[in-house]
Amino acid sequence: MKVSYRLNNCLSLKLALIPLLILLFVVMGSVLSLIAKLDFYFFQQILFNSELHFALLMSLGTSLFSLILALCIAIPSAWRMSQVRLPFQSFFDTLFDLPMVLPPLVTGLSLLLLFSSQGILAELLPFISKWIFSPVGIIIAQTYIASSILLRSTRGIFSSFESGYRFASYTLGLSPFKTLIKIEIPMCWKPLVCASVLAWSGAIGEFGATLMLAGATRFKTETLPMAVYLNISSGDFEIAIGASLWLLFISTCLLLVLRMINRAV
Protein backbone atom coordinates (compact mmCIF):
# COMPACT_ATOMS: atom_id res chain seq x y z
CA MET A 1 0.00 0.00 0.00
CA LYS A 2 2.79 2.38 0.93
CA VAL A 3 4.79 1.44 -2.19
CA SER A 4 1.76 2.07 -4.42
CA TYR A 5 1.15 5.43 -2.78
CA ARG A 6 4.76 6.43 -3.30
CA LEU A 7 4.65 5.38 -6.97
CA ASN A 8 1.45 7.38 -7.53
CA ASN A 9 2.98 10.33 -5.75
CA CYS A 10 6.09 10.16 -7.92
CA LEU A 11 3.97 9.89 -11.06
CA SER A 12 1.94 12.94 -10.11
CA LEU A 13 5.14 14.88 -9.48
CA LYS A 14 6.42 13.93 -12.91
CA LEU A 15 3.15 14.95 -14.56
CA ALA A 16 3.18 18.25 -12.68
CA LEU A 17 6.61 18.92 -14.19
CA ILE A 18 5.10 19.16 -17.69
CA PRO A 19 3.19 22.47 -17.24
CA LEU A 20 6.17 23.81 -15.30
CA LEU A 21 8.48 23.12 -18.22
CA ILE A 22 5.99 24.62 -20.68
CA LEU A 23 5.77 27.80 -18.59
CA LEU A 24 9.56 27.94 -18.26
CA PHE A 25 9.99 27.51 -22.02
CA VAL A 26 7.51 30.29 -22.84
CA VAL A 27 8.93 32.76 -20.31
CA MET A 28 12.57 32.11 -21.18
CA GLY A 29 11.80 32.02 -24.89
CA SER A 30 10.05 35.40 -24.85
CA VAL A 31 12.84 37.04 -22.83
CA LEU A 32 15.64 35.51 -24.90
CA SER A 33 13.87 36.52 -28.12
CA LEU A 34 14.17 40.15 -27.05
CA ILE A 35 17.72 39.84 -25.76
CA ALA A 36 18.81 38.12 -29.00
CA LYS A 37 18.04 41.36 -30.87
CA LEU A 38 20.57 43.25 -28.78
CA ASP A 39 23.44 43.48 -31.23
CA PHE A 40 25.66 46.53 -31.78
CA TYR A 41 23.10 48.22 -34.03
CA PHE A 42 20.27 47.85 -31.51
CA PHE A 43 22.59 48.94 -28.73
CA GLN A 44 23.18 52.18 -30.64
CA GLN A 45 19.43 52.56 -31.16
CA ILE A 46 18.76 52.21 -27.45
CA LEU A 47 21.46 54.67 -26.42
CA PHE A 48 21.21 57.36 -29.08
CA ASN A 49 17.70 57.33 -30.56
CA SER A 50 15.96 60.62 -29.68
CA GLU A 51 12.48 59.08 -29.59
CA LEU A 52 13.59 56.42 -27.13
CA HIS A 53 15.30 59.08 -25.01
CA PHE A 54 12.06 61.06 -24.85
CA ALA A 55 9.95 57.99 -24.06
CA LEU A 56 12.37 56.83 -21.37
CA LEU A 57 12.50 60.21 -19.63
CA MET A 58 8.73 60.60 -19.92
CA SER A 59 8.15 57.16 -18.41
CA LEU A 60 10.60 57.67 -15.54
CA GLY A 61 9.47 61.21 -14.77
CA THR A 62 5.72 60.60 -14.82
CA SER A 63 5.90 57.25 -13.02
CA LEU A 64 8.06 58.61 -10.20
CA PHE A 65 5.78 61.63 -9.76
CA SER A 66 2.76 59.32 -9.86
CA LEU A 67 4.35 57.07 -7.23
CA ILE A 68 4.83 60.04 -4.89
CA LEU A 69 1.20 61.06 -5.35
CA ALA A 70 0.05 57.47 -4.86
CA LEU A 71 2.04 57.21 -1.62
CA CYS A 72 0.48 60.44 -0.34
CA ILE A 73 -2.98 59.05 -1.15
CA ALA A 74 -2.64 55.38 -0.24
CA ILE A 75 -0.67 55.43 3.02
CA PRO A 76 -3.01 57.77 4.97
CA SER A 77 -6.07 56.06 3.48
CA ALA A 78 -4.84 52.53 4.25
CA TRP A 79 -3.77 53.57 7.75
CA ARG A 80 -7.19 55.09 8.44
CA MET A 81 -9.03 52.03 7.13
CA SER A 82 -6.86 49.71 9.22
CA GLN A 83 -7.60 51.68 12.40
CA VAL A 84 -11.37 52.08 12.22
CA ARG A 85 -13.89 50.06 10.24
CA LEU A 86 -15.81 52.34 7.88
CA PRO A 87 -19.54 52.10 7.24
CA PHE A 88 -20.18 49.88 4.20
CA GLN A 89 -16.60 48.62 4.46
CA SER A 90 -17.13 45.72 2.04
CA PHE A 91 -18.55 48.07 -0.57
CA PHE A 92 -15.55 50.40 -0.33
CA ASP A 93 -13.13 47.46 -0.45
CA THR A 94 -14.68 46.30 -3.71
CA LEU A 95 -14.71 49.84 -5.12
CA PHE A 96 -11.05 50.50 -4.32
CA ASP A 97 -10.01 47.16 -5.85
CA LEU A 98 -11.77 47.87 -9.16
CA PRO A 99 -8.77 49.59 -10.83
CA MET A 100 -6.76 46.39 -10.40
CA VAL A 101 -9.33 44.13 -12.06
CA LEU A 102 -10.95 46.38 -14.66
CA PRO A 103 -9.56 46.18 -18.21
CA PRO A 104 -7.15 49.13 -18.63
CA LEU A 105 -9.09 50.51 -21.62
CA VAL A 106 -12.30 50.57 -19.55
CA THR A 107 -10.41 52.36 -16.78
CA GLY A 108 -9.08 54.90 -19.28
CA LEU A 109 -12.49 55.48 -20.81
CA SER A 110 -14.09 56.07 -17.41
CA LEU A 111 -11.34 58.56 -16.51
CA LEU A 112 -11.73 60.27 -19.88
CA LEU A 113 -15.47 60.71 -19.30
CA LEU A 114 -14.75 62.07 -15.82
CA PHE A 115 -12.10 64.60 -16.88
CA SER A 116 -13.41 65.58 -20.34
CA SER A 117 -15.07 68.92 -21.01
CA GLN A 118 -18.50 67.26 -20.64
CA GLY A 119 -17.51 65.38 -17.47
CA ILE A 120 -18.66 65.91 -13.91
CA LEU A 121 -15.37 67.40 -12.71
CA ALA A 122 -15.15 69.82 -15.65
CA GLU A 123 -18.49 71.31 -14.68
CA LEU A 124 -17.11 72.13 -11.23
CA LEU A 125 -13.53 72.91 -12.30
CA PRO A 126 -13.43 73.84 -16.01
CA PHE A 127 -9.62 73.95 -16.23
CA ILE A 128 -9.43 70.21 -15.51
CA SER A 129 -10.44 69.34 -19.07
CA LYS A 130 -7.13 70.86 -20.26
CA TRP A 131 -5.25 68.13 -18.39
CA ILE A 132 -6.27 65.31 -20.72
CA PHE A 133 -4.20 64.50 -23.82
CA SER A 134 -1.12 65.90 -22.09
CA PRO A 135 1.58 64.57 -19.74
CA VAL A 136 -0.74 65.43 -16.84
CA GLY A 137 -3.15 62.84 -18.24
CA ILE A 138 -0.35 60.25 -18.05
CA ILE A 139 0.23 61.11 -14.39
CA ILE A 140 -3.49 60.85 -13.60
CA ALA A 141 -3.75 57.41 -15.21
CA GLN A 142 -0.57 56.11 -13.56
CA THR A 143 -1.53 57.50 -10.14
CA TYR A 144 -4.96 55.90 -10.42
CA ILE A 145 -3.43 52.45 -11.00
CA ALA A 146 -0.56 52.83 -8.53
CA SER A 147 -2.85 54.10 -5.76
CA SER A 148 -5.04 51.01 -6.01
CA ILE A 149 -2.04 48.67 -5.79
CA LEU A 150 -0.55 50.60 -2.87
CA LEU A 151 -3.85 50.89 -1.00
CA ARG A 152 -4.43 47.15 -1.07
CA SER A 153 -0.83 46.35 -0.06
CA THR A 154 -0.38 48.98 2.65
CA ARG A 155 -3.73 48.26 4.23
CA GLY A 156 -2.65 44.69 4.78
CA ILE A 157 0.66 45.92 6.21
CA PHE A 158 -0.96 48.28 8.72
CA SER A 159 -3.70 45.76 9.63
CA SER A 160 -1.07 43.17 10.57
CA PHE A 161 0.97 45.66 12.60
CA GLU A 162 1.25 44.66 16.26
CA SER A 163 -1.30 46.81 18.11
CA GLY A 164 0.74 46.67 21.31
CA TYR A 165 3.27 49.10 19.83
CA ARG A 166 0.47 51.55 19.06
CA PHE A 167 -0.98 51.37 22.57
CA ALA A 168 2.47 51.80 24.09
CA SER A 169 3.03 54.86 21.91
CA TYR A 170 -0.33 56.34 22.88
CA THR A 171 0.48 55.71 26.56
CA LEU A 172 3.73 57.65 26.16
CA GLY A 173 1.77 60.62 24.82
CA LEU A 174 2.30 60.34 21.08
CA SER A 175 -0.63 61.22 18.85
CA PRO A 176 -1.87 58.68 16.27
CA PHE A 177 -0.21 60.69 13.49
CA LYS A 178 3.14 60.83 15.28
CA THR A 179 2.83 57.12 15.98
CA LEU A 180 2.38 56.51 12.27
CA ILE A 181 5.42 58.63 11.35
CA LYS A 182 7.77 57.63 14.17
CA ILE A 183 6.75 54.04 14.92
CA GLU A 184 4.68 52.30 12.27
CA ILE A 185 6.35 53.45 9.05
CA PRO A 186 9.94 52.89 10.32
CA MET A 187 9.02 49.40 11.57
CA CYS A 188 7.23 48.51 8.33
CA TRP A 189 9.73 50.04 5.93
CA LYS A 190 10.59 46.78 4.13
CA PRO A 191 7.04 45.76 3.07
CA LEU A 192 6.23 49.40 2.32
CA VAL A 193 9.20 49.68 -0.04
CA CYS A 194 8.26 46.39 -1.70
CA ALA A 195 4.70 47.64 -2.20
CA SER A 196 6.07 50.90 -3.63
CA VAL A 197 8.27 49.01 -6.10
CA LEU A 198 5.28 46.97 -7.28
CA ALA A 199 3.17 50.11 -7.62
CA TRP A 200 5.95 51.83 -9.57
CA SER A 201 6.25 48.87 -11.93
CA GLY A 202 2.50 49.05 -12.51
CA ALA A 203 2.73 52.78 -13.22
CA ILE A 204 5.70 52.64 -15.57
CA GLY A 205 4.15 49.83 -17.59
CA GLU A 206 0.67 51.36 -17.73
CA PHE A 207 -0.70 51.54 -21.26
CA GLY A 208 -4.48 51.21 -21.70
CA ALA A 209 -5.63 53.98 -19.37
CA THR A 210 -2.81 56.24 -20.59
CA LEU A 211 -3.82 55.68 -24.21
CA MET A 212 -7.41 56.72 -23.50
CA LEU A 213 -6.67 59.66 -21.21
CA ALA A 214 -3.44 61.11 -22.64
CA GLY A 215 -3.53 59.89 -26.23
CA ALA A 216 -0.68 58.52 -28.32
CA THR A 217 1.32 61.47 -29.61
CA ARG A 218 5.01 61.20 -30.44
CA PHE A 219 7.28 63.48 -28.40
CA LYS A 220 4.34 64.66 -26.28
CA THR A 221 2.63 61.81 -24.43
CA GLU A 222 4.97 59.04 -25.54
CA THR A 223 5.96 56.70 -22.73
CA LEU A 224 7.90 53.48 -23.35
CA PRO A 225 4.75 51.30 -23.67
CA MET A 226 3.29 53.96 -25.96
CA ALA A 227 6.48 53.93 -28.05
CA VAL A 228 6.07 50.18 -28.53
CA TYR A 229 2.46 50.67 -29.63
CA LEU A 230 3.16 53.61 -31.97
CA ASN A 231 6.11 52.00 -33.71
CA ILE A 232 4.48 48.58 -34.06
CA SER A 233 1.49 50.36 -35.63
CA SER A 234 3.73 52.21 -38.10
CA GLY A 235 5.84 49.14 -38.89
CA ASP A 236 9.03 50.47 -37.27
CA PHE A 237 9.92 47.34 -35.30
CA GLU A 238 13.45 48.49 -34.45
CA ILE A 239 12.34 51.34 -32.15
CA ALA A 240 9.54 49.15 -30.75
CA ILE A 241 12.06 46.47 -29.82
CA GLY A 242 14.37 49.13 -28.37
CA ALA A 243 11.56 50.43 -26.12
CA SER A 244 10.76 46.84 -25.13
CA LEU A 245 14.40 46.26 -24.17
CA TRP A 246 14.34 49.35 -21.98
CA LEU A 247 11.20 48.05 -20.25
CA LEU A 248 12.84 44.65 -19.82
CA PHE A 249 15.91 46.29 -18.27
CA ILE A 250 13.80 48.41 -15.87
CA SER A 251 11.66 45.42 -14.86
CA THR A 252 14.76 43.33 -14.18
CA CYS A 253 16.21 46.09 -12.00
CA LEU A 254 12.96 46.35 -10.04
CA LEU A 255 12.92 42.58 -9.47
CA LEU A 256 16.52 42.71 -8.24
CA VAL A 257 15.59 45.50 -5.83
CA LEU A 258 12.73 43.38 -4.47
CA ARG A 259 15.07 40.41 -4.01
CA MET A 260 17.62 42.55 -2.17
CA ILE A 261 14.96 44.01 0.13
CA ASN A 262 13.53 40.58 0.95
CA ARG A 263 17.00 39.29 1.81
CA ALA A 264 17.83 42.31 3.99
CA VAL A 265 17.73 41.71 7.71
Image: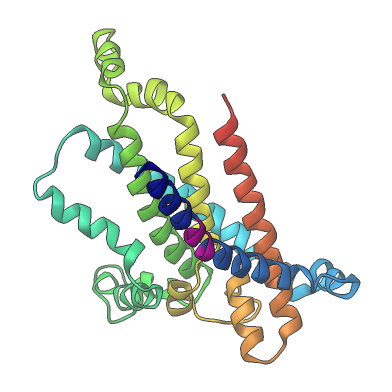
Secondary structure mostly seen in the magenta stretch: helix
Question: Closest to the observer: 142 or 164?
Answer: 164
**Residue at 38% across, 48% down:** 5
In the displayed orientation, state which residue is furthest to the right: 40
Name the image colouring: rainbow
In the displayed orientation, state which residue is furthest to the bottom: 234
* In this view, 171 is above or below 125: above
For the C terminus, the quadrant is top right
- Picture coordinates of residue 249, whole percent (x, y): 70, 59
Is residue 223 among what the camera can see?
A: no
Q: Is residue 258 left or right of residue 48?
A: left
In the picture, residue 179 is in which quadrant? top left
- Is residue 17 covered in magenta? yes
Question: Closest to the observer: 73 or 15?
Answer: 15
In the displayed orientation, state which residue is furthest to the left: 87
Is residue 21 among what the camera can see?
A: yes
* In this view, 39 is above or below 216: above
Give the magenta part as a residue range: 14-19
- Picture coordinates of residue 28, whole percent (x, y): 66, 65
Q: Is residue 216 left or right of residue 54?
A: left
* In this view, 128 is above or below 82: below
**Residue at 51% across, 73% down:** 134
- Picture coordinates of residue 184, whole percent (x, y): 37, 25
- Picture coordinates of residue 11, whole percent (x, y): 47, 57
